[in-house]
Image (spheres, rainbow, N blue to C red):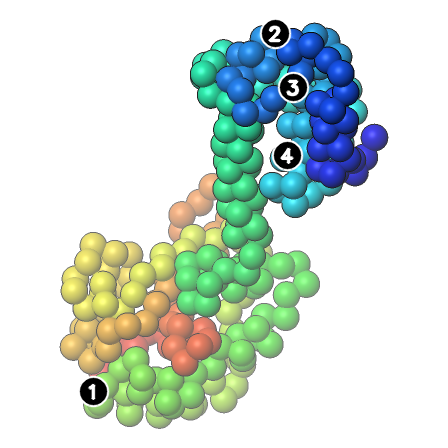
Amino acid sequence: MKGIGKAAVLAAVSGLLAAPATAEERFRPTEPCSQALGQASAEMRVLVAGWVLGFMEAGLKQGASLGAAERDKALETMDSLCAAYPDRSLIDITAAVVTLAQRDQQAEAEAAADPAPGSEADARALVAAFLAPDADAVALTRALRPTEADIRAVYTDPLATSMAAVYAQVWADPKNLTVAPKPGQSEMLLWWTTTDKLIAGDPVLGKFPGGYKDVLAFMRPGFPIVRFKFVKPGETTGYAFDGLVFVNDRWVLMPKPWRMLQ
């Protein structure tokens, strides 16, 4: 049966407790679980399972099933935990199970949520779009065009002025720059870091083209920056791009900045 909620389970429990019965027949979730389960009759164990499932339904805010399989699984879990913690009450143990399940729910929700802007996951999602069979590489690349304000936010003069002038020409024609994998390249390799780490000479600098060492003096801290490659499965060499930077709340592509050094 689907959707039997906490109210129905508690009503059943209340009804049993209100009925004339011996102490052995009563179900008290606040007593040690070794008593609540270990000394319970088969009928009482069914009621205990229903109470546990109802408690979990309320805590996890989702529909519960009180079918035989779910009931047996609940009892199996409670028997195991009660054997390990015989002096803890059934309500304490069930609450602990719910807490762990709630953590799992939260982790799953966070994993399914959109990645944080500028994060490595965000960068991977962006680059993965270029690998889609129906990807419009030109349109996707055009969306990465930096403005002069973007350039000046990341680099200082005189490099910033030189970059703005050169990029104006490069980005004027898609033939000059289009991000797209070569035939057979269906996977990516990606290195995410920050301009702070590059400036500090962090080992990740070695994952970027050597020319970046020449522009560190003009680079401002505080920006996520990425290098990536499109590769064939199992390979590490491929079609590489650098200078994917998160600035002004979006990703832009400013490749090979060292070439603009005067």
| Residue 213, placed above or below residue 235 | below
Identify the disc placed on residue 262. Answer: 1
Q: Dot 4: what SS?
A: helix
Answer with mark 4 or mark 2, whichever residue precedes in sequence. 2
Q: Which residue is mark 4?
A: 55
Q: Quadrant of the C terminus?
A: bottom left
Position in image of residue 139 (x %, y %): 60, 76
Answer with mark 1 or mark 3, whichever residue precedes in sequence. 3
Viewer-side label of 1, 4: 4
Q: Residue at x 53, y 12 (%)?
A: 34
Q: Quadrant of residue 62?
A: top right
Identify the disc placed on residue 27. Answer: 3
Answer with mark 1 or mark 2, whichever residue precedes in sequence. 2
What separation in Å lies between label 4 and label 3 (alpha carbons)? 15 Å
Q: Amino acid at mark 3?
A: Phe
Name the foreground residue: 140 vs 250. 250
Is any part of residue 127 visible from this angle?
Answer: no
Answer with mark 4 or mark 3, whichever residue precedes in sequence. 3
Q: Residues within 10 Å of mark 1 (few under 14, many from 20)?
A: few
